[in-house]
Image (cartoon, grey):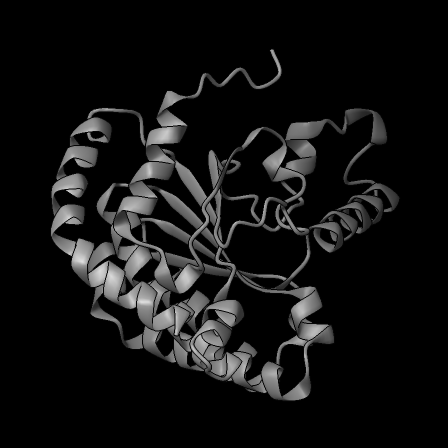
Amino acid sequence: MQGLLQSVARALLRPVYGVYEKWLWRQIRGGDMPRHIAIIPDGNRRWARLRGLETFFGHRAGYEKMRKVLDWIWELGVETVTIYAMSSENCLYRSPEERRHLFELARRGFEELLSDPKIRERRVRIKVIGRRELVPPDVMELAERVEMETSGHGGPLLYIALCYGGRQEILDAVKRVAEDAVNGRVRPEELDEERFRKYLYTSEAPDPDLIIRTSGEERISNFLLWQSAYSELYFCDAYWPEFRRIDLWRAIRSYQRRQRRFGR
């Protein structure tokens, strides 16, 4: 019932949203846009439960929403987007049935990326980051094919964090540093933050300027722990499948109003 009431309310307010959207766009269009936006798309399961649906329907609705949101972001000229598609905890501890559904969506997503003309038109380069050994081989094969076929693109960069954990990323970076030190490729006294970041999964992009999390939760949840040190955080109450263009623009308006000092 609650989900039905929310749907009716949104339908009644749609004309108002149109006016508000134009007003909001006038506020942000001349301001600085983030170079790198990272997204924690939370609330798919709760969205489904409110409607009496199986959780899979929430994940599927969240996937469709992500495709729209990427279009909205790229229309703004944002250079890099990182999506928290699945955490390492999701890949390890969710039920076998839910993991199967999530990987089915990942499989479908990579197949659609391979055939999506917008990816070619925008020259989007795609990289998959995370614990690859936790991803089913056929899904990982598709992911690597997407990476290979977009590697020559010079447009926006899209990181897909799949079976990803921020602590694991830092551990992997430390192991690579140690290996290079043993082999004489780096000396410990030469290591600084800038050199260390080259060992991270996201070494090809600047740190996120803005991290958006939906569903009202206010935590990072093991996402980009090193890179988010000076990111602006924006928490949105809407569940991810309900995220609207005005929610994105509100996040950007909030970002534009903040004075970034980077600890100085």
Q: Is residue 227 left or right of residue 234?
A: right
Work out which quarter of the rendered image holds the N terminus and state it: bottom left
The location of residue 99, given as percent across then percent down, is 61, 81
Q: Quadrant of residue 230?
A: top right
User: Can you say whether 111 is above or below 212 in the image?
Assistant: below
The location of residue 189, given as percent across then percent down, is 83, 25
Q: Is residue 159 something one can see in this rendering?
A: yes
Q: Is residue 123 something one can see in this rendering?
A: no
**Farthest-out residue, top:** 264
Q: Residue 147 or 104: which is nearer the viewer?
A: 104
Q: Quadrant of residue 253?
A: top left
Q: Residue 241 or 198: which is nearer the viewer?
A: 241
Work out which quarter of the rendered image holds the C terminus and state it: top right
Q: Residue 25 or 82: which is nearer the viewer?
A: 25
Could you tell me how many numbered marks the image carries?
0
Q: Give the residue displayed 24% in from the left and 66% down from the top.
A: 8
Q: Is residue 153 left or right of residue 166?
A: left
Q: Give the residue displayed 42% in from the left and 54% down from the top.
A: 238
The location of residue 18, given as percent across then percent down, is 13, 47
User: Can you say whether 146 is above or below 103 in the image?
Assistant: above
Q: Give the residue displayed 45% in from the left and 16% down from the top.
A: 259
The location of residue 214, given as percent across then percent down, is 48, 52
Q: Is residue 182 left or right of residue 11?
A: right
